[in-house]
Image (tube, grey):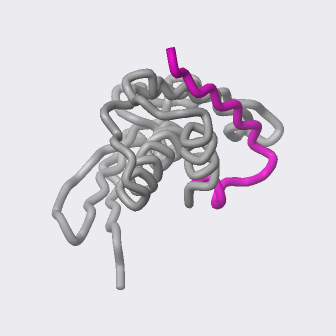
Amino acid sequence: MKTISSSYLGDLRISSTHLKSGNTLETDAPVDNNGKGTRFSPTDLLAVAYLNCMITIIGIYCEQNGLTFEKCEGDVEKVMIDNPRRVGKLNISLDLSSNDWNDKEKRRVQNAAKNCPVAKSVAPEIEVNIEFIYS
């Protein structure tokens, strides 16, 4: 069964529809690759997918293990490289300082986050640096 349908809009823009919900998003090529950079680029979506997957898995882990998950703020920096042009590095920062977890719980949450489905799906050649902030 199809999950997403995409249509080229012209001018390096694409509209995608999540078929189950009907939600849509548009992408644009980045300025450094012939686009206008007015929307997420496909590689931006890769970066945000990694970040959001980690946060989602933290939420699932906490629900399944009776941990209170109060808040998480995250950022990701995407670094492009050439030959071939691709995502070369993701620098991810997760601020989990609003959560009152002991050291053992923090380690388990971090392990769950680092093993999210997106992390297991991206090429191993992408360097991923993750910072967990607790204070």
Name the quarter where the N terminus is drawn.
Answer: bottom left
Residue 85 among magenta residues: no
Q: Quadrant of residue 98?
A: top left
The residue under the point 34% across, 62% down is 6
Q: Is residue 9 left or right of residue 47?
A: left
Q: Residue at x 46, y 30 (%)?
A: 35
Q: Residue furthest left?
A: 22
Q: Which residues are magenta?
A: 118-135
Q: Is residue 128 magenta?
A: yes
Q: Main secondary structure of the magenta part?
A: loop
Q: Is residue 19 left or right of residue 135?
A: left
Question: Could you say which is closer to the camera, residue 12 or residue 27?
Answer: 27
Does 68 appear above or below 34? below
In terms of image quadrants, where is residue 27? Answer: top left
Q: Is residue 92 left or right of residue 17?
A: right
Quadrant in which residue 12 is drawn = top left
Query: Residue at position x 30%, y 49% from top?
Result: 9
Closer to us: 112 or 121: 112
Residue occupying image coordinates x 62% and y 26%: 131
Front residue of this view, candidates 35 and 98 = 98
Residue 127 at what x, y percent from top left?
Answer: 76, 37
Residue found at the far top of this picture: 135
* Of 52 and 98, the residue lying toward us: 98
Q: Residue furthest bottom?
A: 1
Image spot of residue 116 (x, y percent): 56, 55
